[in-house]
Image (cartoon, grey):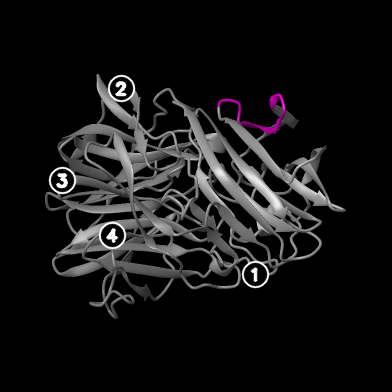
Amino acid sequence: MNECFHFNMDIPDPDVIFHGGYYYLITTTMHFFPGGEILRSEDLKKWEHYSYVFDKLDSTPARRLEGDEHIYGKGMWAPSLRFNDGMFYVAFSSNDTHKTYLYRAEDLKGPWKLNEIKGFYHDLSLLFDNGKAYIVYGNTQIHLTELNSDLTAPEEGGLDRIIVDDSGNPMLGYEGSHVYKIDGRYYLFLIHSLRDKWRRVEAMYVSDSLEGEFTGGDIFDDDLGIRDTGFAQGGVVKGPSGDHLIMFQDSGAVGRLPIAVPFDWMNGKPVFSEEYSVEECDLIGLCGSDDFADGHKDFWQFNHEPDLNLVKFENGFHITTDKICRNIFHAKNTLTQKTTGPRCSAAVTIDASGMNDGDFAGLSAFQGDYAFAGITKESGSYYAVMLSNTSNGGIWDLTEEEGLKEEKIAIDSSILNVKVECDFVKDQAICFVETDTGFRQIGKPHDLHFRLDHFTGCRFALSCFSTVSTGGTAVFNDFNYSSEG
């Protein structure tokens, strides 16, 4: 039986290459920094964090969470990773600035050199061919555009054409381009939806030349028995494990989960098995515990670009506030890491002795419909608190409401241990606070939802925010992560 390798973690829009004995995967990192995360594997089953491409981009007020501005649901989308003539390239568009960025480096650890490609190119894929460079991109109408020699803009008078069209699809037209030259022919892999219902389907088009007609259609419409949403949006990679199609699936609150599906080539087309087994990938160093003794581990990313003048790592993670916030979405320097399915939990110790009245500090299952377990200070006294949000607007709409106080408990210390358990079978989070007799539940179980307001899977997050006066400080210690594989 052919074996697929499944990631039980939010790693959307994967693009994979094989180089120098390793597979390298880059993923969308949206509004999290550092960004452009690259993973590495020798066998497609065991994956580890390898590097980030950038620490920050344009440092706009929205990326810095200045005032009420933010880039939730936007930021860096759908990167393309390629190696050509001794150089690695990463290209992507950003949906807040409507710019296209291209990074290049001789080593995937960097340093990376940046230039912009003039224009905005949705879900672009890079192609290097016969000394020229091209991008394939778009939604519904898929474009092929030749770039100039320094990769900063389209080539004046160069090739520029629509090669595939999915007009009239009422759900989702073609996007998520991945283009390759394989055995002298040009292959384009795409996602779109079935027209009668939302379901990811992978398509492939092929041409003998870049000027010629691209022909093809759907090649993979299967959920492999995991979840009835289909797998799609990915490309192919060839390595010691054979040929694989790397796609992902919408998987509820945990996010968008990739899978590597083996196939054989026959008459220039991928041929898939009628039966597969699915094995979970080993994800090494992509999440975990941290004592914050003198820094933080590589799996942490800040929600939006951090202000490092307001944080320090010295026997704990210290956050100081400098603005008034309505909710955790506007809290600067929130530190996050990914969750894993089917179930996982995290616990942390919070020292609130430096907080002001009206401050909140806590651990959350962080996405639009969050669950937050933490500590607050009111009139000089401390309280354990559970906050939550349930979105009532459109799927893109981020609430500006305060978090709902599900429960508040008076405590006699400024130090509190909290825990959040996530169950992605139920898409639910439960919050706990520690008492003299152990952890007790605070608030009721909270439903989690993957929404386009964040467009990311649920994360564990450490936040501190002020609602009355600024300058308060919270310290987080002994972050403990556990998962059920």
Secondary element at tag 2 = strand
Callout count: 4
Q: Are marks 4 and 3 in contact (CB under 8 Å)?
A: no
Where residue 2 sits: x, y (%)?
25, 23
Mark 4 or mark 1, which has the lower sequence index? 1
Q: Residue at x 21, y 40 (%)?
A: 42
**Nearer the observer, 185 or 81:** 81
Mark 3 or mark 2, which has the lower sequence index? 3
Identify residue for label 1: 66
Identify residue for label 4: 109
The label shown at residue 162 is none
Mark 4 or mark 3, which has the lower sequence index? 3
- Quarter of the picture containing the N terminus is top left
Identify residue for label 2: 276
Amino acid type at image mark 1: Glu
Apparent side of residue 363 relative to residue 272 in the rendered image (left or right)? right
Identify residue for label 3: 21
Q: CA distance from mark 2 to mark 4?
A: 35 Å
**Nearer the observer, 369 or 410:** 410
One can see residue 452 in this view = no
Magenta residues, start to end: 425-438
Q: Are marks 2 and 1 in contact (CB under 8 Å)?
A: no
Mark 2 or mark 4, which has the lower sequence index? 4
Residue occupying the far bottom of the picture: 156
